């Protein structure tokens, strides 16, 4: 070796063999590490491993010192890293071993920590093994499960380091005394599925550190010893399938670390201890197939995920809170003596199996919500007997089969949601029998065939979700009542987009993506469907020029390779016609000056008198007559700046539109003083505003105008015409929160801006909800109704609508009051009421927008549902462009996420009040 090193050194010195010299320097610097990387087992352990390989009597063992001279590379062998100088683990599971002769030899490996010989055919544990391996202080785990061991439990003497002993699934028998008492570190003891008898052992390690005790499927008898509870580190107790009698010790409630308690299939009696309800760590409790009596303990499911008390003699009524905890997934109370009604508060994800046909006999049932469980099988035809049913929600299960025609006989049904299942067949042609249906969601199934033509007669339908199926054929005439959404995405539709969709003038969201629609995008989508806020046409075969859409409409046309963007075309033309543009601009400027002059002269002849119903109007002015107007603000600057005639000019020109919401259209109006204001026109669809009640309208606005909060837009003035009402507000130059979050390319909404916006909106809502005259509710709270004075100064818009709109007298659709898709609380489907808790849900969605950077609805999935389904993956939820800026920002975002999740709780009662939300947000700093 040294001679070779000397020659390499000479060659390196004189530049010979460059590669060799590089290797030499590497060898020289790294030489101390190489013996560690190349070291092998000691000769003693190497010999021991060879002897073990020779003693193994199975052809399943591939250990061979000749084909692989390093035993550390043999199957089931692990050596101590990184040196591989000693064997630490032997896993001989499933080696078809029948002889135990090798076991004493194994104990010559003094470095051994884990020995696993499970799933073999061993019949005995040799005494020499117990003696020799008992002296290995580092031995931590012994696994002899799934063998044919017989006789009594061996006496484990020594084994000072043993932590886990698994002798389950053998034929061991007899009683258990002090055989384990010397094990000072025993944490896991499993002897289930044997033939042990006598009483439950209590000497299970002198140090009392036992964590898991599994004694199931034996023949133990007698009572459960109270001394078991002395092992305060217990996390798992399984005493099931024995012959135990008596009651459960009350002191089991002192096992503060217990997670699983299984007492099934015994002869236990008495009451189930109330003390079990105090174990906050307990997630599973099974006591089925016993003789327990008395009542089900109140609060027993407070912390549980799984509860099985079936086949007992429990009596009384079911506690009202038993089925409500959010983490609860399974409860079985069958075959008891319980009576009374089933609690109405049910946890999500509680049920599995098939839907009981017996539900069809609940003739007075009005709401059936079995959504987001693990239900399977077909929809029972008996559900068609529920003549009073108004809401049927079965989404996100594993239901199969066809949609029974019997369900279409539910005349009072207003909400039908069976999305996210595995339903097949076609949509029944009798679906039009559901004349009271407001919301129909069949999305995410395997439905085929065409949409029935009879669907056009469903005049109450506001939302139709048919996406992600295999529907085909012609798209029939749709109900003109559709307003919330029409979703036909991810189906097999083809051909041109049908012209009859232009009838849907009140539709907000139209999703035709992921089909084979061809031809041009119809112009009616941009110039007739004025209520559209989202149009999704992606991944089709559309051609031609994309029409121009208003700025408030989100349009997605990606995946149509032959579409041409008209803005791109016009920019090319502009690039080639600069001189023409300059000339046109000059002409346009001159025309504008002349027009303004003429208009000013014309308007100077007419007077718009404030606070006077008598308004003079010239016949040559094509502007609506102002019937009533008033200044609401006491601010002298605003009072001197606001000019009603200028406002009328502004609202007569669509070019001044800044924003459209469900209820309002915002125009920008620049006053003669140079100050800009929002002039908001209230939309009068369905005559929701009670025309003729102008006095009440003015009184309500006078009261609202006196409210003062820096985060709430309050009206400064108003005027009415014969068919419209207009309100003045401060101008918010940064647009809406929605635009800043989702439409801005300059990433202006950093975390400081988002957090300030969250706190500002919370302050405004807390103010509105806390008004002394009663809470002021938002009819449509969304990021589109939040306007920004700056990126850190939000203003809640449309807050006065609760004063000027009377939902109870609406002759139109209830969704006009419900709010925007993605922000509507789940309970609205059956309460049809705007509430404080519903506002808090909508605010929670806004918080999630700020945290995730995603809109409230994306690809047909509501943001709240997406976040809840990914609640365990926080970094997937948070907007990485923001959360990665610093650990402090991420920490603050996680704190705000907790607040948001509380706000979007499915249960309205579980949502915090707005003052609490504000306090939690401020504490998140």
Image: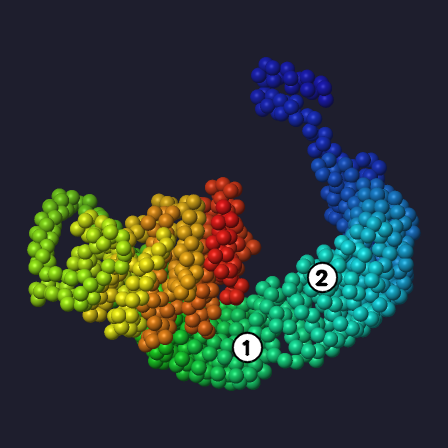
Q: Is residue 519 visible?
A: no
The residue lying at 79 percent from left, 73 percent from top is 269
Image-quadrant location for residue 118: bottom right
The residue lying at 53 percent from left, 78 percent from top is 379
The residue lying at 67 percent from left, 59 percent from top is 280
Question: How far across and down, in percent of the image, does residue 361 sit?
Answer: 56, 85
Question: How far across and down, in percent of the image, does residue 755 sit?
Answer: 44, 48
**Closest to the observer: 156 or 632?**
632
Question: How far across and down, in percent of the image, does residue 862 sit?
Answer: 45, 62
**Closest to the observer: 521 or 778?**
778
* Circle number at residue 260: 2
Position above or below: 602 against 384: above
| Mark toward the start of the polypeptide (1 vs 2) | 2
Does residue 704 appear left or right of residue 12 in this picture? left
Question: How far across and down, in percent of the image, does residue 404 sit?
Answer: 49, 81
Q: Give the residue at mark 1.
A: 378
Q: Is residue 203 visible?
A: yes
Image-quadrant location for residue 819: bottom left
**Closest to the observer: 335 or 724?**
724
The residue lying at 79 percent from left, 72 percent from top is 268
Quadrant for the N terminus, please. top right
């Amino acid at each position: 070796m040294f001679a070779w090193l000397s020659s390499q050194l000479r060659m390196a010195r004189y530049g010979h063999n460059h590669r060799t010299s590089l290797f030499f320097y590497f060898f020289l610097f790294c030489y101390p590490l190489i013996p560690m990387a190349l070291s092998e087992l000691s000769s003693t352990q190497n010999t021991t491993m060879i002897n073990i390989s020779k003693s193994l009597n199975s052809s399943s063992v591939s250990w061979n010192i000749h084909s692989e001279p390093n035993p550390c590379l043999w199957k089931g062998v692990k050596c101590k890293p990184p040196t591989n100088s000693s064997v630490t683990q032997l896993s001989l599971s499933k080696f078809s071993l029948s002889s135990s002769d090798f076991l004493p030899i194994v104990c010559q490996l003094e470095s051994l920590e884990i020995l696993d010989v499970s799933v073999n055919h061993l019949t005995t544990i040799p005494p020499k093994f117990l003696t020799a391996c008992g002296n290995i202080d580092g031995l931590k785990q012994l696994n002899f499960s799934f063998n044919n061991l017989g006789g009594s439990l061996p006496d484990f003497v020594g084994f000072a380091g043993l932590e886990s002993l698994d002798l389950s699934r053998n034929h061991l028998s007899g009683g258990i005394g002090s055989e384990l008492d010397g094990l000072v570190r025993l944490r896991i003891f499993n002897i289930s599925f044997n033939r042990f008898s006598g009483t439950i052992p209590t000497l299970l390690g002198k140090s009392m550190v036992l964590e898991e005790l599994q004694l199931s499927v034996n023949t133990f008898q007698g009572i459960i010893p109270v001394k078991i509870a002395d092992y305060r580190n217990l996390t798992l107790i399984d005493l099931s399938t024995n012959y135990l009698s008596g009651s459960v010790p009350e002191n089991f409630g002192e096992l503060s670390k217990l997670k699983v308690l299984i007492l099934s299939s015994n002869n236990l009696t008495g009451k189930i201890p109330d003390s079990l309800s105090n174990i906050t760590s307990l997630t599973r409790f099974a006591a089925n197939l016993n003789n327990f009596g008395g009542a089900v303990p109140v609060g027993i499911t407070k912390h549980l995920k799984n509860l099985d008390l079936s086949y007992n003699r429990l009596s009384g009524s079911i506690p009202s809170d038993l089925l409500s905890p959010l983490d609860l997934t399974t409860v079985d109370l069958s075959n008891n003596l319980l009576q009374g009604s089933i609690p109405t508060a049910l946890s999500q994800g509680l049920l599995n199996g098939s839907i009981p046909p017996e539900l069809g006999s609940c003739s007075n049932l009005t709401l059936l919500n079995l959504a987001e469980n693990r239900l399977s099988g077909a929809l029972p035809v008996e559900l068609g007997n529920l003549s009073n049913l108004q809401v049927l929600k079965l989404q996100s299960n594993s239901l199969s089969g066809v949609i029974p025609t019997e369900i279409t006989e539910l005349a009072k049904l207003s909400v039908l949601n069976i999305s996210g299942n595995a339903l097949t067949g076609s949509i029944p042609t009798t679906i039009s029998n559901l004349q009271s249906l407001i919301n129909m969601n069949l999305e995410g199934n395997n439905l085929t065939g065409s949409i029935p033509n009879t669907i056009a007669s469903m005049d109450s339908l506001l939302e139709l979700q048919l996406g992600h199926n295999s529907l085909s054929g012609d798209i029939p005439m749709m109900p003109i009542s559709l307003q919330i959404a029409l979703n036909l995405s991810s189906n097999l539709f083809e051909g041109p987009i049908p012209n009859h969709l232009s009838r849907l003038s009140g539709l907000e969201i139209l999703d035709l993506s992921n089909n084979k629609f061809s031809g041009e995008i119809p112009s009616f989508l941009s110039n007739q469907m004025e209520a559209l806020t989202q149009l999704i046409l992606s991944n089709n075969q559309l051609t031609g020029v994309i029409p121009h859409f208003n700025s408030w409409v989100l349009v997605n046309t990606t995946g149509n390779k032959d579409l041409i963007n008209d803005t791109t075309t016009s920019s090319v033309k502009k690039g080639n016609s600069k001189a023409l543009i300059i000339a046109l601009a000059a002409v346009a400027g001159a025309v504008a000056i002349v027009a303004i002059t003429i208009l000013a002269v014309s308007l100077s002849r007419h007077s718009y008198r404030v606070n006077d119903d008598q308004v003079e109007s010239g016949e040559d002015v094509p502007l609506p007559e102002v019937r009533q107007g008033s200044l609401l603000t006491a601010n002298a600057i605003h009072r001197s700046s606001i000019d009603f005639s200028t406002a009328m000019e502004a609202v007569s020109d669509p070019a001044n539109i800044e924003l459209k919401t469900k209820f309002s259209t915002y125009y920008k109006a620049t006053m003669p003083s140079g100050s800009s204001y929002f002039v908001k026109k209230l939309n009068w669809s369905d005559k929701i505003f009670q025309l003729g009640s102008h006095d009440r309208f003015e009184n309500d606005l006078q009261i609202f105008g006196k409210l003062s909060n820096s985060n709430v837009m309050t009206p400064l003035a108003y005027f009415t015409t014969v068919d419209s009402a207009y309100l003045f507000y401060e101008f918010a130059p940064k647009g809406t929160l929605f635009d800043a979050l989702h439409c801005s390319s300059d990433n202006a909404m950093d975390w400081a801006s988002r957090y300030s916006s969250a706190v500002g909106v919370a302050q405004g809502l807390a103010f509105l909800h806390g008004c002394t005259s009663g809470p002021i509710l938002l009819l449509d709270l969304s990021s589109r109704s939040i306007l920004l004075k700056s990126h850190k100064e939000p203003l809640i818009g449309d807050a006065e609508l609760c004063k000027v709109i009377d939902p109870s007298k609406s002759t139109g659709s209830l969704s006009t009051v419900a709010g925007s898709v993605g922000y509507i609380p789940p309970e609205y489907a059956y309460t049809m009421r705007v509430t404080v808790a519903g506002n808090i849900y909508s605010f929670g969605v806004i918080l999630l927008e700020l945290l995730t950077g995603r809109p409230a609805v994306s690809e047909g999935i509501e943001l709240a549902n997406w976040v809840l389904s990914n609640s365990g993956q926080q970094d997937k939820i948070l907007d990485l462009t923001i959360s990665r800026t610093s650990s402090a920002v991420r920490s603050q975002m996680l704190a705000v996420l907790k607040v948001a999740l509380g706000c979007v709780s499915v249960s309205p009662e579980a949502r915090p009040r707005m003052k609490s939300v504000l306090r939690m947000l401020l504490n998140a700093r």
